[in-house]
Amino acid sequence: MPDASARVPEGAPPRMSACPDWCVVRHGMILGEEDLVHQGRMLDIAEGVVAQLVMSYDPETGQSDGPYVLIGGREYTLDAAEELAQTLLAIIESGRSPLAGG
Ligand SMILES: [Zn+2]
């Protein structure tokens, strides 16, 4: 589903869609496919694991794909990433439970 916040104006699609608020890429500085991806700030969430928002753009169709959350090289939809976060919170919550018979 295209993101309404990154709407492309009518007519010939531009080389790149308008950046979403979270994009930190200075487009036009790099060439190739990399330049067609909006990328958010990289967050170190675990040793060797970085999480980052990404959204690609196809200048031929004017369609954006994403945003996705890139975690350790794998793309998650926002819903899937939220589910992952909830799972992590559930693990943390379990760890906070008092020990039985303590
Ligand atoms: Zn961008």
Image (tube, rainbow, N blue to C red):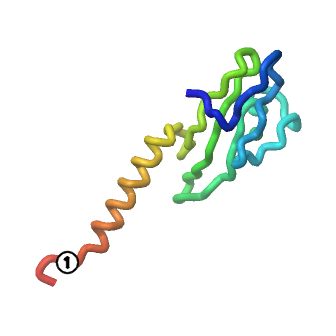
Where disc 1 sits, the SS reads loop
Quadrant containing the C terminus in the rendered view: bottom left
Residue 54 relative to residue 101: left or right: right
Which residue corresponds to mark 1?
99
The total of numbered circles placed on residues is 1
- Image coordinates for residue 86, horizontal then vertical, percent: 38, 54
Does residue 13 sit above or below 71 in this rendering? above
Residue 76 relative to residue 61: left or right: left
Name the residue located 71 percent from the left edge and 42 percent from the top edge.
20
Residue 31 relative to residue 97: left or right: right
Q: Residues within 10 Å of mark 1 (few under 14, many from 20)?
A: few
Q: Amino acid at mark 1?
A: Leu
Give 88 or 1, whichever is nearer the viewer.
Answer: 1
Name the residue located 11 percent from the left edge and 81 percent from the top edge.
101
Give 5 or 97, whichever is nearer the viewer.
Answer: 5
- Image coordinates for residue 70, horizontal then vertical, percent: 57, 42
Judged from the image, the quadrant occupied by ligand 1 is top right
- Image coordinates for residue 40, horizontal then vertical, percent: 68, 47
- Which image quarter: residue 58? top right
Q: Which residue is outermost to the right?
A: 29
Does residue 10 sit above or below 89 in this rendering? above
Say if disc 1 is inside 8 Å of ligand 1: no
Name the residue located 59 percent from the left edge and 33 percent from the top edge.
66
Give 70 or 85, whichever is nearer the viewer.
Answer: 85
Name the residue located 69 percent from the left edge and 52 percent from the top edge.
41
Residue 80 relative to residue 75: left or right: left
Q: Which residue is outermost to the bottom?
A: 102
